[in-house]
Image (tube, helix red, strand yellow):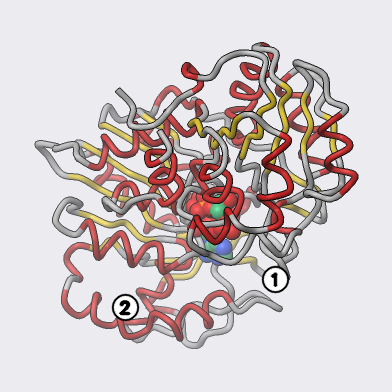
Amino acid sequence: MPEYNTLDDLEDGQRVLVRLDLNSPVEDGEVQDNNRFDRYSETVAALADADHKVVLMAHQGRPGRDDFVSLQQHADILAEHVGKPVEFVADTFGEDAIAAIESLEAGEILLLENTRMTDDELPEKDPEEHADSEFVKTLAPHFDAYVNDAYSAAHRAHASTVGFPLVLPAYAGLVMEREYEYNTSVANKEFDGPVTMVCGGNKSEDVISVVNNLGGKVDNFLLGGLPGELFRRAQGYPVGHDLEGMDLLDGQWDETKDTLEDLVENRLDEFGLPVDFAYEGDDGDRAEIALEDIEEKEDAYLDIGHDTIEDYLPYIEESDAVFVKGAVGVFEDERFADGTVELISAIAESDCFSVIGGGDTARTLDLYDIDEDEFDHVSIAGGAYLNALTGKELVAVEVLKANA
Ligand SMILES: Nc1ncnc2c1ncn2[C@@H]1O[C@H](COP(=O)(O)OP(=O)(O)O)[C@@H](O)[C@H]1O
Ligand SMILES: O=C(OP(=O)(O)O)[C@H](O)COP(=O)(O)O
């Protein structure tokens, strides 16, 4: 029995406020379709088919970043996946939003503007404080029920994730239920043979958290992406050059330097580290360089090289279980997709237990036609998936349980 209410407990024909996580990559201002839309379309269609008036909330990006944009495009993409119109109102909880909510008929779907465009949504606060915000107090009286389906934002204590369930009967949506049950059960799973985790992406703190919390359970961490470069920098190699206008590597290095130096000094035998890297050569093509030939920090490395891929493949082939968190290169650019695609394809071909995690990373499967059914689970969450794997509670799920 789930410890929270689910859609099975929700009577038909109600006014339902639903929190989704439609946070997506944005390239040149264009929101990129990805499997979050596909997964959420099932929940949204089920609610519309049950004659609810369906009002959706979601966030996109973070204030101040390029991906902090309106949800107008998300409504169109979601409508394609649901196969029904999804109206959009460019307002979070003002007069326009309320008017649009009130004019909705049973079975109709409306998406409100990016929740992070109201000051009440951020920052992290207690559920009680969020429940007392104007955002929650204004919207809640227009609804009979609140559904949280935003598993991938369930580690965030924001008004839309923890405030509403205190003032409305609250239910977990289909995505929330499946991801929570699955990722929590995986955390307790035991394997007879070696367990490997491929860690890449652009959030080094996530990787440090996994390495610190799962050291006893994971035998090999194969590193790529930004963490791969920073672990090598911690050994004294001059790698980790930021792309123009970005401060990802140097910024993260300042924050994580001491921990990384400690890890490479004391736990080196647990890590697979890149022995070569790919970068954009003078002709614009993919070029590769061996780690030992790098003399100074002057190129941005965008993928692990082929010698590193060859080093990593046997670990995957010999493991009983392989987990992935974060792509080992900038797979969105075909020139730098080799590392991510070759490692994920090897996992797909192996008969090991496998989980692919990370909103961005899961997109590799769509872009490179890798069949999702080849894996035991593909999570559309990154940070929340890691919290589950490392046994940490998800604040928004705890609020749902308390409200059950
Ligand atoms: N060497 C690299 N330099 C810059 N970005 C990278 C590099 N390797 C991977 N990335 C980027 O990391 C992103 C995924 O990072 P992250 O948010 O940590 O993963 P997820 O969303 O899957 O949890 C991808 O969009 C990829 O382009
Ligand atoms: O995409 C998300 O996180 P993820 O990349 O860890 O899966 C969530 O939407 C949370 O976004 P946030 O990390 O800006 O709070």
- 100 or 260, nearer to the observer: 100
**Crowding near the residue tagged with mark 2, few <14, some 14–19, many ≥20 C-alpha atoms within 10 Å:** many
Secondary structure under badge 1? loop
- 213 or 242, nearer to the observer: 213
Ligand 1 shown in quarter:
bottom right
Q: Can you say whether 341 is above or below 1 in the image?
A: below
**Labelled disc at residue 316:** none
The percent position of residue 252, horizontal first and vertical second, equals 48, 78
Relative placement, left or right, of 319 versus 46 is: left
The percent position of residue 103, horizontal first and vertical second, equals 88, 27
Relative placement, left or right, of 262 versus 343 is: left
Q: Can you say whether 210 is above or below 177 in the image?
A: below
Q: Residue at x 61, y 39 (%)?
A: 19
Three-letter residue code for mark 1: Asp
Q: Quadrant of the N terminus?
A: top left
Q: Which residue is drawn at 31% across and 78% down?
A: 260
Three-letter residue code for mark 2: Leu
The percent position of residue 95, horizontal first and vertical second, equals 89, 47
The percent position of residue 272, horizontal first and vertical second, equals 28, 61
**Labelled disc at residue 260:** 2
Upstream in sequence: badge 2 or badge 1: 2
Image quarter of residue 195: top left
**Crowding near the residue tagged with mark 1, few <14, some 14–19, many ≥20 C-alpha atoms within 10 Å:** few
Relative placement, left or right, of 225 versus 143 is: left
Q: In which quarter of the image is the C terminus?
A: top left
Of badges 2 and 1, the one in the foreground is: 2
> What is the C-alpha distance between the residues marked 2 and 1?
32 Å
Secondary structure under badge 2? helix
Q: Label 1, on which residue? A: 282
The answer to whether one can see residue 302 in this image is: no
